[in-house]
Image (tube, helix red, strand yellow):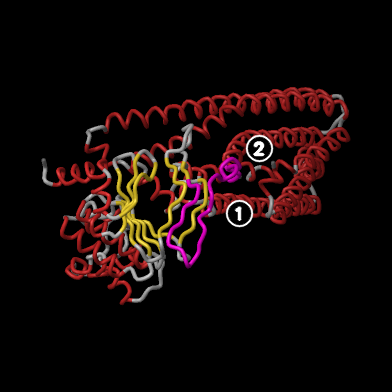
Amino acid sequence: MVARITSGHRRTFLLAVSGAATYAICTVLSAAGIRHVIDTAISPRFEEGSVGSGAVFSAMLVLVGIGVVRAAGVVTRRSFAGVTEWRAAGTFATQVVERICSQPVWWLRSHPTGEVVSRLTVDAEAAVSMLAPLPFASSVIVLMLFATIAMLVTDVFLGLIGLVILPLLLFVNLGYQRRVDSFFSAAQEHLGDLSSAVHESFEGVTVVKAFGAEEREARRLSGVAERLRDARVETVRLRSRFESLLDLIPSLAVVVLLFVGAWRVGRGEMTVGEVSAFVYLFSLLTFPLRIIGYALSELPHSKAGLTHIDGFVGGGSIKGTPIGLDPAIGVELHDFSVTFDGQPTPALVIPNLSVPRGSAVAIVGETGSGKSTLVGALAGVLPFEGRVVVGAGGVAPVFQETFLFARTIRENVLFGSDSDEESIREALRIADALNFVEELAEGLETVVGERGVGLSGGQRQRLALARALVSGRDVLVLDDTTSALDPETEARVVENLIVGMHDRTLLLVASRPSTVAMVGRVVFMADGRIIEQGTHDELLGRSLRYAALMESYESDRHGN
């Protein structure tokens, strides 16, 4: 697990470990320094009434020298441990971003935004949380080895008493890790759920307020937050018990050692300096065990975060088929089908469909006939099986529900394209948006609010259409994109599209009979199948179902 987390950052991690080892060695040597100071400077002052300046100077030199080197080790350890931790967190975050960017659009629809954000932030930080104490904990072996030898050399009897305590402290550490592991995993799961729920609630805040469901939404979020709280509280409860035991056991052991040490000093078997050095060495052994405990307490946290990231980045195989590109083709489908997760049969099946380059086709059908499913698959929003080939430039989709960014109109239309001013204005003209844009005080530099707030639905749809036109894609796929427009404006937009298409291919989901009649070819869908193809007039003459649908559309328009 450590190798997995520090992969690509081994040099800085080893520097942190080296600094920790330096600190450990100097810490053990400081026990000898304390013994030297007590026996050569402090005890003579009490016993003889004076002490030489040379003894004082040597004592100061020993302490300062050890302290300077130890401080350098601390600075090295902390600096490079921090560098390793945040570089590793950046690596995990980058892996998540690369995973997102490498997936088709439909993959993002199957992963809530809150989950993605949680993997990118919360789990990336959690995965590296054990790196902060790990270099220090790794030096414990050095510290314990040297301290144990020094204790036994100082006094075998006290050394054996001190070493008896170590297995007990180790047992406490391992028991804590085993019990707290499940709570850390549960807390990390609940944190991801809370992130997803909060993001979803913020996204739908207007719907929540419109239906007066604030209290219901608050209860829903409270339930998720309470589950997270319960897992965290139980973790803290276990950790508090663990910390208390780590404080209690060494403290009791020190009392015993001081009692036995005083007894041995009274018998002349040890000096005061030796007892002081021994107690100091024992505290050195118990303190590293606290560091190990801290590292072990972070281990479940890191393990939970790393598991979530690996599950997200690994992700399994991607189903579906990529869309092929051919400059000589408009749109071609062969053995095409779309099956939704959990459904036994395909929702849409099209054995063959060919739309010549530069032609326009209206896609018509009743609700649930598969129109939006077809558009979603061509746009890359839904996975499909079979073979799909489109023009070399790819597909530019425009959905009924448009999305505008809180940027200028120019930036929303360009959307990364390097088109010039003339191309922007031509796209706006075809989308019948040029007039209302020019009437705005800032024109193309007008900043629209988030999601285009401040613009009407029809204005947002026309700007989204202009964005698709500027993209330069060979195929335009419009999913009832002009539904928010009045019939006159819709007619102008469709006419502009047909006239200004040039070599582009247009697939238009439409419901107004007048709009359908303007397009040369109609594909009539029902029950996830294409059941008729031809011109509007031809289908009216030979398909009662199509004629009934057109009549119902016309009746709806007139409010009958």
Element on which disc 2 rests = helix
Left or right: where does residue 122 sit relative to residue 482? right
Q: In the displayed structure, would residue 23 be above or below residue 218?
A: below
Residue 295: assigned label: 2
Q: Residue at x 43, y 53 (%)?
A: 353
The residue nearer to you, when weighing 159 against 229, is 229
Indicate yes or no whether the magenta region holds residue 39.
no
Left or right: where does residue 217 sit relative to residue 68? left
Where in the figure is residue 540, as x and y percent of width and height? 24, 48
Indicate yes or no whether the magenta region holds residue 314.
yes
Left or right: where does residue 550 sit relative to residue 326? left
Q: Are marks 2 and 1 in contact (CB under 8 Å)?
A: no
Give the residue type that dot 1 points to.
Answer: Arg
Where in the figure is residue 394, as x and y percent of width and height? 45, 62
Where in the figure is residue 420, as x and y percent of width and height? 35, 76
Q: Quadrant of the N terminus?
A: top right
The residue nearer to you, when weighing 515 against 453, is 515
**Circle 1 Cα neighbour tier, 10 Å, few/some/many (<14 / 14–19 / ≥20):** some
Element on which disc 1 rests = helix
Q: Where is residue 57, by image quadrant?
A: bottom right
Residue 290: assigned label: none
Q: In the displayed structure, would residue 234 be above or below residue 27?
A: above
The magenta stretch spans which residues?
309-336
**Circle 2 Cα neighbour tier, 10 Å, few/some/many (<14 / 14–19 / ≥20):** many
Residue holding disc 1: 87
- Nearer to us of marks 2 and 1 is 1
